[in-house]
Image (cartoon, rainbow, N blue to C red):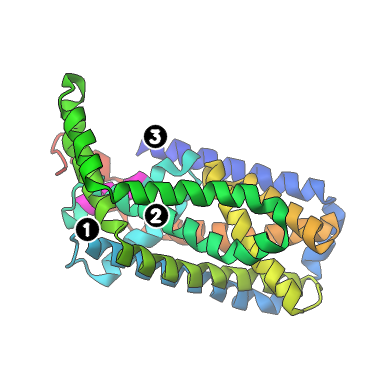
Amino acid sequence: MRNLRRRLIAGLILGFIVILALTLLGDIQEVGDHLTGFTWHLAPLILACTLFNYTLRFVKWHFYLTQIGIHDLPWSESARLFVAGFPLAVTPGKVGEALKGVWLNKIAGSPTARGITVVLAERISDGFAVLALSTLGVIAYPRYWPAFAIVLGALLSGVLLSQIRPLALAVLDLVDRIPMAKRITHHLREFYEGTYALFRPRATLIAVCLGTFAWFGEGVGMYLVLIGLGVPGSLENFSLAVFVLSFSTVVGAVSALPGGLVAAEASIAGMLGLLMGLPTSTAVAATLLIRLATLWFGVTLGLGVWSISRDLMLLEERDQGLGIRD
């Protein structure tokens, strides 16, 4: 947990630096004027869009838990674990999210490696979802096609390979014959069984549909941010807002930076300027507002859960020497 806290603090510091750098890039005075003049009565609606996203993604999370054999975890406990995972997204490479597998082991008795596959499946299904929302934008702006195709190809390859069971089992049997790898073979098998169950066609289709509606909600939030900054309302601007939010989410995820920091912000601000012709100060103000309403709103909710969940935060120290089921 001490190592995790250091990683989290590093992510929070990076987030502060990114906000400062963006503000300086857009000119502090001009960005401040945009924020002051923002239509703040839209803020509850924007946060409602984010909560809509979180709600559907929670339904997907709970659905995934049933797919790996966790059927008796109360919805309230499942929600606590789901929200507590938000701050873990700002750890470098999002490696802290693996802790959710440990929580599932402690609370639900699920093998840790299998629980980690839920985190992986969440990310991959979210990737498919935001790519689906980006499709029309990529068709309209072919310059984004190469990145779109590479990410889509990587996601499809991973899912398809997980379903070729004879090949996966053969590889695991081969690994089992390596003396140095014998101690981790059991964990690898649990990890594979989890991915095999979660990436079955039916489970994947349900998860991607939920994710697509969820991320569409944040796209609506992006549009409301632009409206609040004085950008004219139109179907074209609405479509661009959804595309910008979706594609920047892909960029942030591929970067593997904490919470997509730097990459997502640069992508949002750059695309708003390039595709919508917004002045730099307006694009920066929009970027700051949407990231505060999405990423940092979620981190705040998660830290709130941490403050009343010492069993999660002190998990490793509590079980030191006792062992955790795996």
- Between 18 and 127, the one lying in front of the other is 127
Position in image of residue 73 (x %, y %): 21, 66
Q: From which residue to which does the magenta span run?
A: 98-105
Q: Residue 57 placed where, x, y %?
A: 42, 66
The amino acid type found where label 3 is placed reads Asn
| For discs 2 and 3, the disc positioned in front in the rendered view | 2
Camera-side residue of 92 and 183:
183
Residue located 48% across and 59% down the image:
128
For the question of whether residue 15 can be seen, the reply is yes
- Seen in the picture, residue 324 relative to 287 is either above or below; the reply is above
Quadrant including the N terminus: top left
Q: Label 2's element?
A: loop
Mark positioned earlier in the residue sequence (1 or 3): 3
Mark 1 Cα shell of 10 Å, populated few (<14), some (14-19), many (≥20): many
According to the image, label 3 marks what residue? Answer: 3
- Say which element carries label 3: helix
Instruction: Tell me, yes or no, whether the two marked residues, 2 and 3, touch with CB atoms within 8 Å.
Output: no
**Alpha carbon distance from label 2 to label 3:** 16 Å
- The tag earlier along the polypeptide, 2 or 3, is 3
Say which residue label 1 marks.
Answer: 68
Q: Is residue 3 left or right of residue 43?
A: left
Q: Residue furthest top?
A: 179
Residue under the point 67% across and 77% down: 42
Foreground residue among 217 and 87? 217
In the image, is 111 to the left or to the right of 87?
left
